Image (spheres, rainbow, N blue to C red):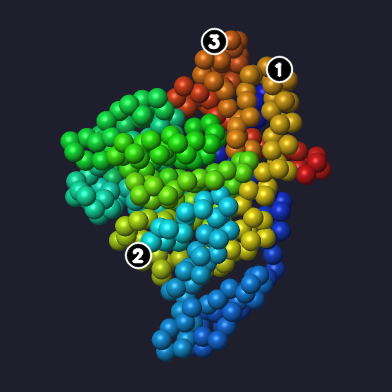
């Protein structure tokens, strides 16, 4: 029996197609960063060229450069998230985690839900992304942080002491890489709960339209870290909300302009979802090999970088197999990140 090379944490594969763009030799013109540059320019190298906003005095306004960037991101993701552009407030962030923290902070201080000034109870599905809980604890929200199974989520009270429950849900799910049906989220919203939707894995599955149209979906966060493998570069994180997040206001100044422009280049040259067909075929080969080499009954996730296994499968495992998968347990299931296998295949010249 061979060892299992999967990762417990999800570190995305730095895809070869993406490397060519991230490491490209194109440099931003120096005039872009000068406060006295006249506003007479579009950035070339984009199709169409990217508009650079200007100040009333006629000079370049980099404080607003994220605005046309986010419009281009919304357009690129429209086949996947058609209603993303309906969120009034849009913020550039250093990955989705920054947006998550600030949204939690706004909920803690009563500055996000207009119908209450009280701190709302925070809930997640069992086995979800750990960052939600860790950030909540850091903000002193741990006592109200509750995990539920999907079945329990649709039967628990949508409010606590009259305050709406706020769900943090990743879709596709960080639990097992599966797409959560829009109807499930709609049912939570229809019952009166609020939802913060984390689309960190969007673009890594077969074509699917994520419905964010419900008014009780109060915020959406997303990032290019996983679908493009640029986690270490902090390229392309965004938060979209229906109410303003005061603590994110300053991000119009404190942002990485080159990274934002690189994000546009990535989503327009490699449209969201376009890597799925190529790498899902490799995912199938990897999982077949793992099953053959370890005897583990793992399954393909919707997200091509992941695999999963039912918790009840452990009853059929040998002691050695149980030890092999112990660290991968998340609630009532197991999740595996396949990045090392993709990198090994690349070293063999098969990518």
| Of callouts 1 and 3, the N-terminal one | 1
Residue indicated by mark 3: 315
Image vertical order of residue 242 relative to residue 324, above or below: below
> Can you see residue 292?
yes
What's the distance in space between the residues labelled 3 and 2, CA to CA? 51 Å
Q: Position of residue 342 (x, y in %)?
A: 70, 39
In the rendered image, the quadrant that contains the C terminus is top right
Which residue, given by chain and number where applicable, does mark 2 sit on?
A: 249
CA gap, disc 1 and disc 2: 54 Å
Does the residue at mark 1 contact the one at mark 2 (Cβ under 8 Å)? Answer: no
In the picture provided, is 46 more to the left or to the right than 158?
Answer: right
Q: CA distance from mark 1 to mark 3?
A: 19 Å
> Is disc 1 surrounded by few (<14), some (14 to 19) or many (20+) residues within 10 Å?
few
Above or below, 124 relative to 63: above
> Percent position (x, y) of residue 124?
38, 35
Q: Under tag 1, what secondary structure?
A: loop
Picture residue at 38% right of the left edge, 35% below the top: 187
Quadrant of residue 188 within the rendered picture: top left
Tell me the residue that label 1 is attached to. 1
Mark 2 or mark 1, which is nearer the start of the sequence? 1
Q: Nearer the viewer, mark 1 or mark 2?
A: 2
Tell me: residue 82, above or below residue 54.
Answer: above
Which badge, 3 or 2, comes first in the chain's sequence? 2
Residue 9 visible in this rendered orientation of the protein:
no
Residue 330: where, in percent of width, then height?
47, 27
At 35% from the left and 49% from the top, the residue drawn is: 215
The 10 Å Cα crowd at callout 3, few under 14, some 14 to 19, many 20 or more, is: few
Residue at disc 3, secondary structure: helix
């Amino acid at each position: 029996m061979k060892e299992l090379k999967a990762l417990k944490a999800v570190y995305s594969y730095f895809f070869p197609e993406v490397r060519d763009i991230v490491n490209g030799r194109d440099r931003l013109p120096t005039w872009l960063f000068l406060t006295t540059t006249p506003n007479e320019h579009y950035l070339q190298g984009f199709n169409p060229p990217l508009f650079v906003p200007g100040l009333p005095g006629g000079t370049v306004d980099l404080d607003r450069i994220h605005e046309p960037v986010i419009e281009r991101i919304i357009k690129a993701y429209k086949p996947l998230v058609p209603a993303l552009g309906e969120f009034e407030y849009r913020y550039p962030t250093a990955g989705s985690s920054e947006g998550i923290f600030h949204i939690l902070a706004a909920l803690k201080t009563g500055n996000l839900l207009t119908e209450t000034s009280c701190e709302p109870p925070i809930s997640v599905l069992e086995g979800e992304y750990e960052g939600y809980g860790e950030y909540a604890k850091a903000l002193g929200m741990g006592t109200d942080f509750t995990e539920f199974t999907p079945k329990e989520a649709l039967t628990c009270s949508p409010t606590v002491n009259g305050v709406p429950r706020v769900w943090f849900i990743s879709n596709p799910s960080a639990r097992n890489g599966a797409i959560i049906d829009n109807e499930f989220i709609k049912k939570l919203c229809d019952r009166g709960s609020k939802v913060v939707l984390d689309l960190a894995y969007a673009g890594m599955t077969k074509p699917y339209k994520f419905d964010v149209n419900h008014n009780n979906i109060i915020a959406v966060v997303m990032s290019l870290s996983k679908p493009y493998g640029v986690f270490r570069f902090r390229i392309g994180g965004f938060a979209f909300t229906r109410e303003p997040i005061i603590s994110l206001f300053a991000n119009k100044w404190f942002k990485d302009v080159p990274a934002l422009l690189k994000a546009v280049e990535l989503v327009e040259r490699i449209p969201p979802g376009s890597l799925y067909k190529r790498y899902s075929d490799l995912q199938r080969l990897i999982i077949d090999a793992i099953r053959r080499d370890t005897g583990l009954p793992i399954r393909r996730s919707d997200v091509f970088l992941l695999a999963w296994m039912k918790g009840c499968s452990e009853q059929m495992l040998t002691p050695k197999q149980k030890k092999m998968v112990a660290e991968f347990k998340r609630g009532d299931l197991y999740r595996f990140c396949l990045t090392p296998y993709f990198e090994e295949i690349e070293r063999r010249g098969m990518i």
